[in-house]
Image (cartoon, grey):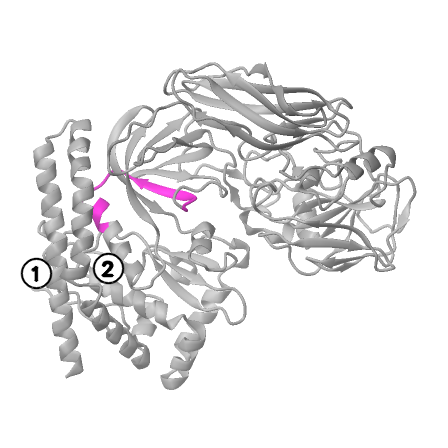
Amino acid sequence: MAQCPGQATSFPAVKREPQWTRGTRRRWPAWVLILGLLAPGAFGSVVLNELMYHPPEARDELQFIELHNAGSNSINLAGWRLTQGVEANLSPTNLPPGGLTILCRDQVAFREHYGTSAFVLGTFTGRLKHSGERVRLERRDGSVADTVKFTDRPPWSLAADGDGASLERRTPLAPGDEVANWGPSVLPRNKVAGGTPGQTNSNYSARPIPWVGEVQFSPAQPNMPFSVTAEVDAAGGVRDVSLLWHSLRESSRVTDQSVRMERISGEATHGTYRATLPGQPAGRLLRFRIKVEAQDEGVRWAPDPNELRPTFSAYVLANTNQSRIAEVRLINWGAQERPGSSLRARGGDGRAEPVRGLSTFVVLPTNGGPVLTFDHIRLTPRQDGWKVRLHPDAPYVGITTLNVVHEGKPRWLLAEPLGYEVFRRAGVPAPLTGHVRVWVNGRPLGYSLYVEQLNSSFLRRVNRDTHGNLYKLLWYGEGLEGQHEQKNNSALGHQDLAAVMQGLGSEKGEAQWDFIQRTFNVEECVNYFAVGQCLQNWDGFFNNYFAYHEPGPAGRWEMFPWDLDKTWGDYDGASPKYDWYAMPLTYGMNGDKEPARWFAQRRHPWGSVEWWRPGGWFSGPLLANPQFRTRFLERLEALCQTEFTEERFGLVIDTLAETLEPEVRWRALMRGGDPRSAVAEFQEDLASFRRQLKERRAVLLRELAKVRR
């Protein structure tokens, strides 16, 4: 066998007790199971054995594909190829029986992270898509040795989609194209690239294992029996199906209880099983999982212990919510996650997040529907509330990460959703927002605002490519890189930002306008700045926004709004009446100068006027370009004639007032305050928004008329 310098040449044999995952609704074809039992190696000797397709922290250089010789003879891989997903021509190497070998995207990065014990045969070109694709292994004669088409959605593993686990094949005796034959590797505690390259798969089984299909359970009503049913397949027949469960009341260690599930229909090879648990008091969390033991000693767990959610869950509560907004309960069952807490990533200088959470997010909808339980989630305290991180396959109203804002001025809980609504009506992608009545660990806190986090889920929702670069603009930091916080693709650096800034600065006149049209989504950026003028978003030209760069050579730049609490006439040191209406039309562009004041105000890094900022990285050159500026002013005037009017947007303010006034009273009671004074403050805040809508619009139309003259 050919050897590579510095590489190990041992190929560990497959000898490990399996760990099991939830299957799919697809049943193993009978001929597959029989052939697999009778004819080891029937699906080809060399198989695709493990895929690391989405390493955490955007470290795609750690992608790898593991091959395994499941046959009884050595196989010379000369002329073998990977032909779909990624491409590789395999070198002439003899892979012995039981042998494992790796094809990776970057050998140096792979060895730095995983060490040198795994045998690396070579590299592949291209990149495995995070959303999933087909991978195909061909023999030297062009015939297909093995293939798998994976995705990033259930029933495929969620843990393998950027949370550290790899996709492991369960047995070489069943097809690679069956999702039931794949499961996640052992889930790391923190978000670092894991897997078992060069080792026996943690999911390995000597034969095809049982399958658990659709699992259904009744709503968890207080003190009522709780039923669970599951479809089960086992080629050689089922020996036992059991439901392991426990009930949580508070943060404490619990021990699973076991209940036998009885077959209520079907046969021993394919049937439906049911178990009923005793009723539980309100406020308990039921967690349960299913264990299937086959006659041939194969075992499967559902869910897989290595998944992000290792149990099914149901919160025991009757939905009595009669308010106009949903009621949510945030519950932490273990050590509270601390903001920014992380551990050093293995094999790198980055820092890794925890993978699995210890909290539960419960929603009581307003329509009397079933209580929604989001379990094993991360709940992180933040300065003004909490960050709620849900799982990608189970979002709330389309959102996977919510910023639940509870503290700060009550006016800010109104300014943000109203501001984002103007952006949306103008055609700018903006976070979803809403209000919910919040309880934390059994304590009622009153209504709060939730704001969608700008992340890959947001990009997917607004039909943007999730592989694009996303930057958060900060007011602090040094220079271009210091003020642009990378929110994804950190390994790529800031090269695209440096390139666009160089282009904006080096081109002049028509050449600059041509560059802007090629490089920016002009319509979206024009809309962004026009709405910023309507809202007097003084903080959103220089900082407090996200910049997004679409991938590919022709990818364009866009701007997404963020952090709109101090808008609608509010700024540091603003009048309590929020009666500031006069932010100039030149604000944010190169050449704009700080307004003169005859008395000194509180100093800040840019001068003496609290709301003034110099031109931003994007706003400065874009708004100073004559052609871009013409379109910006035209769009601003159009908004003042359509969306930003008392007749049209006033209805939005009125609807918000009607929805939230009862919540203002309830929140005041929960906090020991005076409901009447709270409602009076609420009404005055709403009046200030109506004044802004009227007076700011009048100022804009007056200034636009001067520009036309």
Percent across and percent down for residue 671 are 18, 28
Q: Nearer the viewer, residue 588 or 175?
A: 175
Q: Is residue 381 above or below residue 109?
A: above
**Quarter location, residue 74:** top right
The segment highlighted magenta reads 398-415
Quarter the C terminus occupies: bottom left
Front position in the image: 381 or 522: 522
* Quadrant of the rendered image containing residue 45: top right
Where 433 falls versus 356 (above or below)?
A: below
Asked if residue 322 is among those painted magenta in the image, a careful observer would answer no
Q: CA distance from mark 1 to mark 2?
A: 24 Å
Q: Is residue 1 visible?
A: yes
Q: Residues within 10 Å of mark 1 (few under 14, many from 20)?
A: few
| Any part of residue 608 in sight | no
Three-letter code for the amino acid on which mark 1 is drawn: Phe
Residue 399: in magenta span: yes
Which residue lies at the image location 20% right of the left edge and 47% below the top edge? 656
Q: Is residue 367 left or right of residue 276?
A: left
In this rendering, the label closer to the viewer, 1 or 2: 2
Q: Secondary structure at mark 1?
A: loop
Amino acid at circle 2: Asn
Numbered tag placed on residue 537 in the rendering: 2
Q: Which mark is residue 599?
A: 1
In terms of depth relative to the viewer, which is nearer, 419 or 142?
Answer: 142
